[in-house]
Amino acid sequence: MDRYSVELIDVTKIFGHREAASDSIVAVNGVSLRLIQGELLTLLGPSGCGKTTTLRMVGGFETPTYGRILLDGKVINDVPPHRRDTAMVFQSYALFPHLTVFENVAYGLRMRKMDACTISAKTRHALSLVGLEGMEERPPGSLSGGQQQRVALARALVVEPKVLLLDEPLSNLDARLRAQMRIEIRKIQQALNMTSMYVTHDQEEAMSLSDRIAVMNHGRIEQIGTPQDVYARPANRFVADFMGSKTTFLDGTVMSLDGDQVNVQVLDAVLPFEKVPDIAPGDKVELVVRSETVDIVPPGKGTFPARIIHAAYFGSHVLYEVDLFGTNVTAEIPDPQERNMFSRGSEVGINLKTRSIYLLRKVMN
Amino acid sequence: MVSLLIRQEAELGRPLNRRSQSMVLKEPLVVFVIIAIAAALVLFVLYPLYSVLKTSLMQSDGTIGLEVYRNLLAKSYNRRPLVNSIRLGVIVAVLGTIIGFIFAYCTTRVDVPLKGFFKAVAMFPMISPPFIMSLATIMLFGNNGLITKHFLGGLVNFKIYGLRGLVIVETLAYFPTAYLVLSGVLQAIDSSIEDAARDLGASWWQVFRTVTLPLAIPGIASALLLIFIESLADFGNPIILSGDYQVLAVQAYLRITGLYDLPGGAGLAVILLVPSLIAFFVQKYWVSKRSYVTVTGKPSGQRISRNEPWVKTAALIVCVVLTAIILLFYGTAFVGSFMTLWGVNYDFTLANYRHVFQVAGEYIKDTLFLATVATPITGLLAMIIAFLVVRKQFFGRQALELVSMLSFAVPGTVVGIGYILAFNQPPILLTGTASIIIILFIFRNMPTGIQSGIAALQQIDPSIEEASCDLGADSGTTFRKITLPLIAPAFFSGLVFSFVRCVTAISAIVFVVSGRWKLITVAVLGSVENSDLAQAAAFCVVIVGMVMAAIGIINLLVYQPWKRGPQEVSKKPAISGGAEPWIGTA
Ligand SMILES: Nc1ncnc2c1ncn2[C@@H]1O[C@H](COP(=O)(O)OP(=O)(O)OP(=O)(O)O)[C@@H](O)[C@H]1O
Ligand SMILES: [Mg+2]
């Protein structure tokens, strides 16, 4: 039988009174997760969906109302945080303002009663891992945001936890530093082969550093899978919408099945798509049209006629908003230098890259 | 004085405010107001202090010199009041801070039930006359005390008059200061810092010792100093309870009213002033600069981090015991006010209240009249000064702020002596009038309002006021139409505070009352001097009733529950448990 590093079984957290439904908040609702050794799993979802609460339950700061949390196969529901082999990087960093950088990082080792030599060696090693050599004696208040973030990371890494918990560790950094730090975090995590749970609401961040992503909404997990799974094969409209930067949903009707292919009527055309499970002729579907799956061609060509409503030049690409039979569709066209740009109001043609477009069964309500 | 702390935090937002500091010289009204206020502060704050100092330097042969101080400090016997006052202050500061800290920790860090109730009871001592605790102590532990005589049969002598009694009473009276300061400090510590320590393997005690306590040290130092100042200034309790244990505030009073020794009384006042001022300046310019600025960016939502059953139980026991003690004292005073003769005859009677309302009715009338006149003036003046200090740039701005705050640190006894020395002869002859009482009320009670006004103003973006000026309103109109409504909560809490102090304070006022104008606190003192504890207790109950009524009325005005509408959202009660700047010397 497999032993998982971390396992959450049907975990629910209700804040407030259990009985009085009116003033209680179901922050986490029946979440089950399994992490294998060395895996980095990201909890991704909009604000208030219960990511932090889930993480804090693993760290021991909240007790699940229902369900079990296992660490290395042992139930740890009632183990207080300081006895758990987890280490957390807090959203606010939570550095000890009255201690130096060195003492901040050494704190966990001191609590483990290690001898001074080991503490010093381990602390210095952890600081070098995050590139903070020479900053040992600085008070954390005098560091930049990125440096504070590294101290927080080093402080968690140095105790060699079984699970590393990171709660939006990069949300206080500017965009450039954020991109750089997420690569560093991933490299360190892989080098140490450390099981990690990472919370973020930034889908790009989640995609670029996770082994698997759990997309959460309203306290539930909507889908769990590799970045490719959740992006290219979303389980439902919420996931599809949350994962892309600009996603349009077009209605379609399944006309016929043809081996690995489904023919779907969209607007006034019938187009072939890759088959998705559980689908039959006559079914209503939604096309997950992401901006990069739309191509714009000169007028008269392409599957559909359309009109440019808005064009925004980004250097590496152009974003067009086009009117397609009354629906606004966003199209991302790479490398605009290579092609002609279309101006606002011009009539164009549109092609859909059907191989990259996923079909969702339409949920009737 | 809690606001001094708040202030330091608000200061971070200062650069924003700078931009709006207009050139006051272009606004004659502002210039006029500043000059008028500065003149008033010099006349009613500095000049009395100067008079005290001058009088204390008058030698018996009419020359200027240190003779008074030589007499007061030369022999160790004469130094006793100073030593006693400081010893009492230190003990009370330490005990009060410890209790205040424990109580603050229990109510901010632990999820105890009935939190609101505990907080409310802890605030009792702040809104009641200072000597109510002493009365209850005598009723419980005095020679005829309920516990000493009736439960213990007079076998144990508690020796309640003296240091022991004063320590009990002042600790209970002043621990709320520490509680307010420290609950503010503890709330300001991002709880995720403590979580982080727990997460790294620290037990509850280790987190407390290595994180919480070090981060609270500046707050603890502040609390110690503030209680020390309050204890030094306390007059109401020692006059009743000190016995042979002489303290400065009482000795200064006795020297002047009993021995008519003005230079000696003034000298004692100066000696009392020195440690108070030292503590004040250490607090203001040293301790409060030491606080740790939170390092982190996005603050995490405050989560109460302790909810294990045993911590909860322990905290609950602490809270229950403490509130039970406070309620025992207040309950004793309340019950005592219905007794015929405490310690001898425990028959129920309304005679004490009959006396209070019939014979002493004019005390109540005068007190209400004087307080009602002084309170709005105090509140408005405080807001104007706060506005000038925060929003206008002018020569002497910092001096104005400092002087207006000085009364925090100056014991009431010193102020009272200053007023009788400064205003008992032409050109300013005020002794015996209502004016001197009202003026004393205003300048004693204003600093608190100023501080909460400053704290409130610093949170308001000055561009709101700029927009008003931009649309054609002048400084005065902007203050009236824009600023005042925005700082209304601070204004109202200033009003409440000022009224409470008017009807409860004794130390300064005892010097300036006269046959013509009678104050209820002075009546309590009279009853105590006649050994009529029950009657004194009845007075105290009436005072507390007046305070409650005033708080109720002002809260009602702020809330306006009969008006329902969207504006309700923005209104806060004039008193909310939190870090209201409710502290000052009695
Ligand atoms: N201690 C608490 N008491 C009551 N409700 C809480 C508590 N902590 C969290 N909640 C509620 O639980 C829900 C989930 O909160 P949580 O902090 O887990 O969200 P999140 O996904 O981390 O959001 P964000 O991205 O904004 O950090 C929210 O509705 C929140 O208000
Ligand atoms: Mg969160």
Image: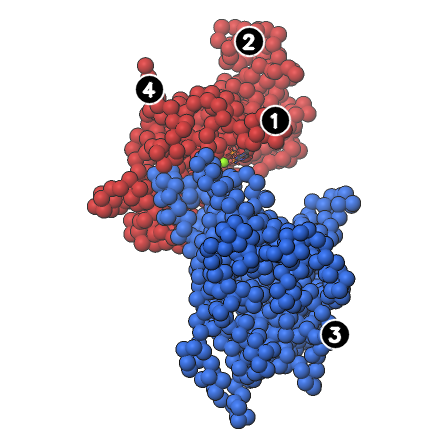
| Crowd rating for badge 1 (residues with CA inside 10 Å; few <14, some 14–19, many 20+) | few
Labels 1 and 2: the sequence-earlier one: 1
Nearer to the camera, A47 or A325? A47
B531 w.r.t. A95: above or below:
below
Q: Secondary structure at mark 4?
A: loop
The numbered dot on residue B516 is 3
Labels 4 and 1: the sequence-earlier one: 4
**Total of numbered circles in the picture?**
4
Q: Please tell me which residue is depicted at 48% across the width and 23% down the height of the picture.
A: A66
The numbered dot on residue A3 is 4
Nearer to the camera, B367 or B49? B367
Q: Determine the colour of chain B.
A: blue
Whole-number angstrom distance, CA of label 4 to CA of label 1: 37 Å
For the residues bearing labels 4 and 2, Cβ distance under 8 angstroms: no
Mark 4 or 3: the one toward you: 3
Tags 4 and 3 both on a single chain: no
Mark 1 or 2: the one toward you: 1
Which residue position is annotated with label 1? A21
Task: Answer whether residue B331 is visible to the viewer in this image.
Answer: yes
The numbered dot on residue A279 is 2
